[in-house]
Image: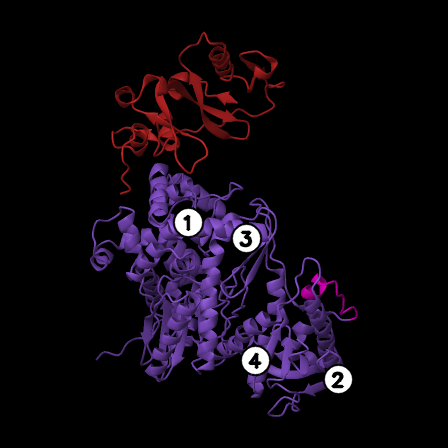
Amino acid sequence: MRLHPDEAAYWSPELCFVNVPIKGQKRDTLHLIDEDLAMSYLPPARILRFRLALAAKPNAVFFLCHVPSRNQDNSWNGSNLQACEQAKTLWTLVTSRKEEGVEAYKIDSARDPDAFPDPNWPTQSLTDLISVTFARRMIESEDHPALLRLIGARQSTS
Amino acid sequence: MSENFGTVVVCDFEYESAPGELCDVLCMVAHVLDEHLRHVHTVRLWRGEFGSTPQFDVGPDALFVAYSAWAEMTCFKVLGWPFPVHIFDQHTAHLAASNILLPYDPDQVRKKLRKRLPDACRAYGIEGWEKINKDTIAEEIGAGHWAKYGREQVLEYCEEDVRMSVRLLHAQLRGRPGMPRADVERVLYWSNYSTKCIALIQARGIPIDMALWNLVQENKVAVIGELLRQFDPSYGSDDPIYTPEGEWSYERFERWLIRTGVVAWPRLDSGRLNIDSDAFRLMYHVPGIEALHALRDSLGFIVKARLPIGRDGRNRPSLFPFGTATGRNAHAKSPYNAHAGMRGFMMFPRDAIGAYLDWRTQEIGVAAALSGDTALMDAYRTGDVYHALAFVLGFTDDPDPVSWKKHDPAMRNRMKALQLAISYGMGVPSLARGLDRHPLIASEIIERHKRSYPRFWQWRADMVQTAMLKRRIESVFGWPLHISTSPNQRTLYNFPMQAGAAEMLRLATVRLCEAGVVPIMLIHDGILFEETEREKIEHAKEIMRQAGRDVCDGLTIDAEVDQMLENGARYHDKRPMAQQMWQTVMRALDAVGAMPKRKAS
């Protein structure tokens, strides 16, 4: 992966997230949540906090990478952050070392730095990209279906 | 079979045919067999020798056998021969034996297997036609170029088909691994529809306003241009979805979706955009999509102009009975294979009554009846199952279906899509996309539907489980679908409803033909008629209702008049998009001065 080198424009500040279980979907769905709403309605342990950075895979597949913003002394978070920094300039592969009994990520860079062309980064703003990616998954009001689900309130189908 | 019939006649015709025309019979060969299927004698007839009745028994003691026997029945009709009482259509038997749901693999593009006589023979390990280039001869005879072969060679070609049909008949009655033995009783029942009825219906044809059709063809460029201007939401941009010639591009459509911010278009498991009609319908809430769908379904009709129309101005489409896995017809090349707006090309003679009758929300009625879900049956009986659905799902608190239908037509359309989606097992993510709602709302809707109609959900789960165990699923009256490993479960969910609806259409059609009310077109849940007496239309309606009751174990599936066209009236679909489409075509003709000037009164 590569991360956008312009951290000011394409790395977000720390944001709040929450996983929401949805019946009929195999995995919980990650939602972006307004911090005030999160603090008011959710137990702190349920709230996830990290940064989002625009990232790319070699075949021009773009995604938002989760960049740790807390507990950077933790070896997982520390190695993750190190990989993100490296990926600003180099094609970087990150793999878990858990099977070796090591609590950290292994960070590799492409053998030839020019093996893949530099990403042709999208020109939309990070805010626009986050809005599209988290369409319908941004909890910004008290009546958002995901928040209603988390606090056990009745859903309205209308 | 041999115990029931004293004579078995295996027969084939050769004929000349032009698109939209009835066939011009050239020759016929029949092998007359005894009750043990032993050859007794051969009948070979050439043009001019046919007479007014067949030279073999077609009464109740005889069985007539042919491959795609609707074509033979068309020849019978042209010759004025009486139809055989019992017909074993080998094509229908082969479709039943080879109707298999293959393992679900969204990445594999499967070519539909051909099922002509040689293909059926090969499926049973029968080889033949070694010395004959069958495709070329068939094509040349059809086009009237048979003279180069001469009478004897054409008769020999025809007889080779008969010899192969006899061998195929033996094989179909025996069966082989992977090809179950033909269920004769059922094949006879199905053949009544797939041969005699189909021949009668295709022979009648749909009346087309030829003057207008030709006008549109002559001014195609202007019409296409106007349609694009009106219905292509990307028209006028630097990267339009359609070329000015009316050619669609997948890539340009994908780019348009990105440009307009439509991120949630349904995709196939392969990752490609799903561009079938259901996907478009699901996305009608996106501005421009309904118009684009209408455009897609209309342009092909006008640009390709593949409508087979005879010299009598009648469109004679191929009905292809049992052409789909659920046993529905796979009709092609008719105004019903295009957007509803294109049905305006149908215009009935002044002395005829054109009537289009359809069953009310047919598939939901079938689902209610087959599942035995009393709540769903009650909802169906209210007359507007979509209102009932909206009410239980919390989309409306208006208890009156009539006022709801009047005041919220958009919601009603959304309920149609929703009911279809739920019936066919659509998952939460797709349903959320289609409703343009959060997945939790989609999930909640499914849960409420489950609570409202629990018997339906249980029946559907049981039905799929039984099908997977038996590796076979059947319609109400026995049309089979064989199942391989790992089929697409949604196809199984879908099967009883569509197959039941197809049974209803077949049953009604057979009864209508027996009553002398021969339809001019069959369209899944509707039937098009051209009659001279209103009483016959009323009679047809009653026959359709009764067929609904018979398939649905007594639940009345009402048949309603959608169109009643008298005094030379033109067919106009009532839906707003269809009307807009038709008006655009007329406006384009008007703009280029192609429309005849009206006389000032």
Chain B tint as drawn? purple
Q: Which residue is mark 2?
A: B40
Q: Are marks 4 and 2 in contact (CB under 8 Å)?
A: no
Please identify the quadrant where the C terminus of chain B is shown: bottom left
Local crowd at mark 4 within 10 Å, few (<14), some, or many (≥20)? Answer: many
Q: Position of residue B359 (x, y in %)?
A: 37, 66
Residue A7, can we see it?
Answer: yes
Q: Amino acid at mark 2?
A: Val
B118 shown above or below B601:
above
- In the rendered image, which quarter is residue B429 located in? top left
**B522 is within the stretch colored magenta:** no
Mark 3–mark 4 Cα distance, whole angstroms, equals: 37 Å
Q: Amino acid at mark 3?
A: Ala
Mark 2–mark 3 Cα distance, whole angstroms, equals: 44 Å
Which region of the structure is painted magenta?
B119-131
Local crowd at mark 1 within 10 Å, few (<14), some, or many (≥20)? Answer: some
Of the image marks 2 and 3, the number of the one nearer the N terminus: 2
Local crowd at mark 2 within 10 Å, few (<14), some, or many (≥20)? Answer: few
**B128 is within the stretch colored magenta:** yes
- In the rendered image, which quarter is residue B246 located in? bottom left
Residue B421, can we see it?
Answer: no
Mark 1–mark 4 Cα distance, whole angstroms, equals: 44 Å
For the residues carrying marks 3 and 4, which lies nearer the camera in this image?
3
Q: Which residue is mark 4?
A: B74
